[in-house]
Amino acid sequence: EEIHMPETSPPPQPSCASVDLQGDSSLQVEISDAVSERDKVKFTVQTKSCLPHFAQTEFSVVRQHEEFIWLHDAYVENEEYAGLIIPPAPPRPDFEASREKLQKLGEGDSSVTREEFAKMKQELEAEYLAIFKKTVAMHEVFLQRLAAHPTLRRDHNFFVFLEYGQDLSVRGKNRKELLGGFLRNIVKSADEALITGMSGLKEVDDFFEHERTFLLEYHTRIRDACLRADRVMRAHKCLADDYIPISAALSSLGTQEVNQLRTSFLKLAELFERLRKLEGRVASDEDLKLSDMLRYYMRDSQAAKDLLYRRLRALADYENANKALDKARTRNREVRPAESHQQLCCQRFERLSDSAKQELMDFKSRRVSSFRKNLIELAELELKHAKASTLILRNTLVALKGEP
Amino acid sequence: MAAEREPPPLGDGKPTDFEDLEDGEDLFTSTVSTLESSPSSPEPASLPAEDISANSNGPKPAEVVLDDDREDLFAEATEEVSLDSPEREPILSSEPSPAVTPVTPTTLIAPRIESKSMSAPVIFDRSREEIEEAANGDIFDIEIGVSDPEKVGDGMNAYMAYRVTTKTSLSMFSKSEFSVKRRFSDFLGLHSKLASKYLHVGYIVPPAPEKSIVGMTKVKVGKEDSSSTEFVEKRRAALERYLQRTVKHPTLLQDPDLRQFLESSELPRAVNTQALSGAGILRMVNKAADAVNKMTIKMNESDAWFEEKQQQFENLDQQLRKLHVSVEALVCHRKELSANTAAFAKSAAMLELLSDYIRLIAAVKGVFDHRMKCWQKWEDAQITLLKKREAEAKMMVANKPDKIQQAKNEIREEIEEWEAKVQQGERDFEQISKTIRKEVGRFEKERVKDFKTVIIKYLESLVQTQQQLIKYWEAFLPEAKAIA
């Protein structure tokens, strides 16, 4: 099936408007359209820019998920950006679960009435659409952060990504590459452990010491919170879905009754239908404002951790270079190369430290303002829904009690 | 046989006390006569109908009846069984089944014996008037509470004892407030007695809570975890609801077994409620035979009301089951949600109500079935009578001088007997139909009240939850705003 983002409606706000982007209009990127085909999603990336580099002021290309990953990896592997937090890559679009559910529904369950079936189908379709919108938003936010960053936006690969009309011929990683990537991660963590255990390696800067401890803790906690929020959100969703058969059963009970219970049942059926919609909205709000935000910051904090690791690596290298220089000096052999190597390491380290500091402070303020905004919005929405629920519950109670 | 037709005196020209209580009295006669009409009863004991005076309200008359008619009853039971379906006989005869070693045949008869004390409910006391009045005026001055579950004993012989407290101003009770300790099997025993007495004449007897081997084993073994406390609490609540429903029924309230259950400090242990008792197996077989019978009885339903009602209950049953399944899912998910957000799950109460009603409706259906069986008996009696008459006619025509006189007499007697049976069958059928109509009316009223009450309570609890939510989020909002 193909699902198109409606062209006429305004571009969707990034669902995790958790990213506070600088209002710099010299390079504006957005995903103006997206199509879901079979198991691929094709994003239309539209750029508006007055930068001299580009041939036109407005242009768009079609990109797939793999190309986003390629871009992200290109940034990560680039030494120049070692001192920066690279925006986390968007997660792969995953419609599996939703598709499975739709299929199961299609297989049919004879005990389900036509109305129930229609409602359930509607719910599932809405779910599918929601997942779709989210994945578009994630991909968009990734690009927008890059576009907003003073250094990252100037990357050559980024320009190619935005402008090159043809397919970037970036195939998905084959098994060997995936494995390689996986191994690299293991090596990285092992390395990190080694470095920290290295004797003589002193963290010279309190700021970083503090940041490191904080980030490690933070990352674990936020990952936990994210999982729990997901569970809560899912439970709310299940609850909302539960109301469908209940409402239907009450409805048929009501139509059958010949006594006073008739109106009661019918009113109840209506009530549950409304509650269902509310509950569903609670679930989706929680999803957007809380779960998504937590997830995003989980990834972002991982990116920050990566930055710290790189800096630490640089520090270790610097330390090693120092030791090597000392050795060279005592032996009075190859002092020159040792000196220049040490210089290089020192410079690198300092460069990284400076930019890292800036990045981390930006990260913090970004994080804080995003949490603040989302939590406020979440609280306000929850209140709104709770009040609405109370209202319809009260109305139904009045109606029920009023009858003989 | 004619001698046994004595009980009818109870019917006509009776002291005024009896007047309001026609139904009860009829009930009595019908049961009694059914017992008598078994041709195979060895010693037709004359029913001490005279003993049943208007003013006695103790179990005394019942006791007398007990001794005299023990064999009668047992014979009657066998007889009735063979009348209905040959399959049942073998089971009954091999009764002392291994599963219930201490149970002797006499104990097994116990339920039936007690049915004899049907005489007791027809205790034409002023208390009955009181109750009827109260029922009509909707002020039922009796409150039952089940509380304080207590574990008694250890290991696999352990059981939970519950305190049953009664508060009442009805004069038929000796005190206005009293309590006793009962265990689960006592409740089951009570239900079994009430069911055997009243179901087959058309009263909707509320079903007892279900046994749960798993649940109980956990409690016995001594697991002090939340699931076993939850189980005990659920059971306690179910037992309370069961008693409250039973007590609300004006006829059942008068039953001496019920009163004994509520009042007496010592209760004979109900043994045939063990999970795999012989009586239990018999019940199962009976149920199966019933199902077969239902399919084969083609009743000529002349009364549209019954047909309509039966259909209605069938539909209701289906709908409730469906709803029950959905609400179960809801409860499950609410539990999940509450586990994840530490809130409170309240839809469980709805669930309780629904499962109660599903079982109540099964009882209702049972009552309708009994009516059908009653009708069938009547039909059979009519058919037999017809055959006998034919036989007589044939005999008249044939010319066999020798045995003719004796045979004629015999056949004459048989015809008379069957005529009586037909009449009785008809009366029974009408009686049960009448009773069922009343019962269904009462049941419906109760149902409406019950459902409404629970629904309102549930909705109110939902409102409360939402308000709590509002409170918390309102408290949280300023905190969120203060994030910096």
Image: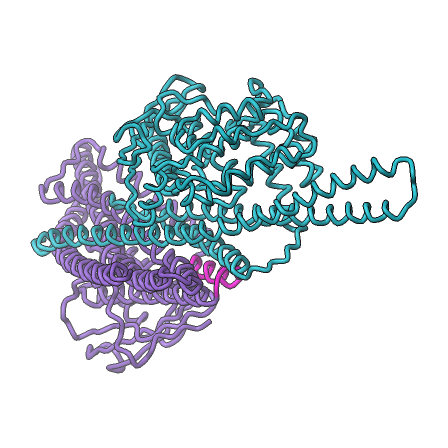
Chain colours: A purple, B cyan
Is A110 magenta? The answer is yes
| Residue B396 against residue A128 in the figure, above or below | above
Q: Position of residue A181 (x, y in %)?
A: 38, 50
Going 64% across and 28% down the picture, which residue do you hit?
B44
Q: Position of residue A128 (x, y in %)?
A: 39, 64
Main secondary structure type of the part rendered in magenta: helix
Instruction: Answer left or right for B357 relative to A196.
Output: right
Is A98 magenta? The answer is yes
Q: Position of residue B22 (x, y in %)?
A: 46, 45
Instruction: Decide which of A72, A218 is in the foreground and name it.
Output: A218
Span shown in magenta: A96-113
Instruction: Decide which of A331, B333 is in the foreground and name it.
Output: B333
Instruction: Answer left or right for B432 relative to A398.
Output: right
Instruction: Decide which of B44, B315 is in the foreground and name it.
Output: B44
| Residue A352 against residue A29 in the figure, above or below | above
Q: Residue A14: which quarter of the image? A: bottom left
Q: Residue A260: which quarter of the image? A: bottom left
Q: Residue A159: which quarter of the image? A: bottom left
The count of marks equals 0
Quick check: can you spot residue A18? no
| Residue B2 against residue B361 in the figure, above or below | above
Q: Which quadrant holds the C terminus of chain A?
A: bottom left
Quick check: can you spot residue B51? yes
Instruction: Decide which of B255, A397 is in the foreground and name it.
Output: B255
Going 56% across and 30% down the picture, which residue do you hit?
B47
Going 88% across and 48% down the picture, which residue do you hit?
B397
Q: Position of residue B50 (x, y in %)?
A: 50, 30
